[in-house]
Image: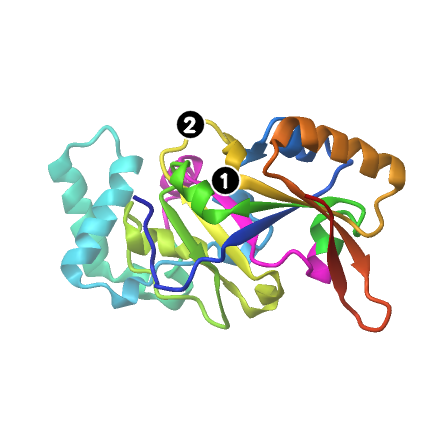
Amino acid sequence: MIKRFTNSEIPKTLYKYRDWSNNYHQDLIRKREIYITNPSDFNDPFENIPIRWDLISEEECDNQHYEIFKYIFKDKSEQEIRKIAKEITNSKILLHPSKLSIENPNQIEDWNNKIGILSLSEECDNILMWSHYAKNHTGFVLGFDTNLFLNNSDFDYIENVKYCTGYPIIKSIGENDDFYKKFFHKSNDWQYEKEWRLSKNHIKDRLYVIPKEAITELIIGCKMNNKTKSEIVDIAKNSLGSNLKIYQAKKDIENFKLNINLIEN
């Protein structure tokens, strides 16, 4: 069963903005394939949230240090590693402000390599999102029915991203709920994305096949040329099934907004 951190209502449809000139993005329509991102590859460098060692009890510090050092000192016994961990706790070196984000990079990289994140948006008419992620409105957006998606997928978490000015307090580096919360927080600067994320643990293949019945909407960018539009619509009809509704994004004639008009049902 998929996990939640809050009780916020999951939108009925979530959207992915794509660039048709990118062959990998085309595969979302041709093969229903999408790449599940390694957290190390996020485009926001501030998403590597530090562990707040200063808020952890001495016993918890011992255990956290042990989890780190067992990856570093693989040739030492558990007793020797726990002794080193205790010495580090007693030295309080990690309580210095400049040391708060010290983590074993090999361990963190190992965890990140096992985690996959799928980023979606709750809006399909966001002008900035079309500009940034759908090649200046020449691309497309796919809409996923969240109930059908979640009922036929094996993701572990779904949550809307929390936008904030300060880092959330993360007090654990183990594989638990507190550790995974770090993937669902971003700076306020990104709030225009209205992002939802799904995370999958212990991932083996980063190419993920979206359940066919979950893909219910295709939206054509307002600047896509007619030739490309005809191509993408034909491919989508053949590969995505009869449940698909096709829309055209158009600039409003009076306001700075996009109108999403149904063209094929």
Q: Which residues are magenta?
A: 103-129
Label 1: how many Cα within 10 Å (few below 14, some 14–19, many 20+):
some
Which amino acid is tagged 1? Asn
Q: Position of residue 3 (x, y in %)?
A: 32, 50
Residue 191: quadrant of the picture: bottom right
84 or 251: nearer the eye? 251
**Tag 2 secondary structure:** loop
| Distance from the alpha carbon under mark 2 to that under mark 1 | 12 Å
- Kindly identify which residue carries mark 2: 204
Pick out the residue farthest to the left: 79
Which amino acid is tagged 2? Lys
What residue appears at the point 38 percent right and 36 percent down from the top-left corner? 154
In the image, taking residue 244 as reference, residue 75 lies left or right, namely: left
In the image, taking residue 254 as reference, residue 261 lies left or right, namely: left
What residue appears at the point 74 percent right and 55 percent down from the top-left corner? 261
Marks 2 and 1, the one that precedes in the sequence? 1
Q: Position of residue 51 (x, y in %)?
A: 35, 58
Q: Position of residue 31 (x, y in %)?
A: 61, 26
What residue appears at the point 79 percent right and 70 percent down from the top-left corner? 256
In the image, taking residue 147 as reference, residue 53 lies left or right, namely: left
- Kindly identify which residue carries mark 1: 38
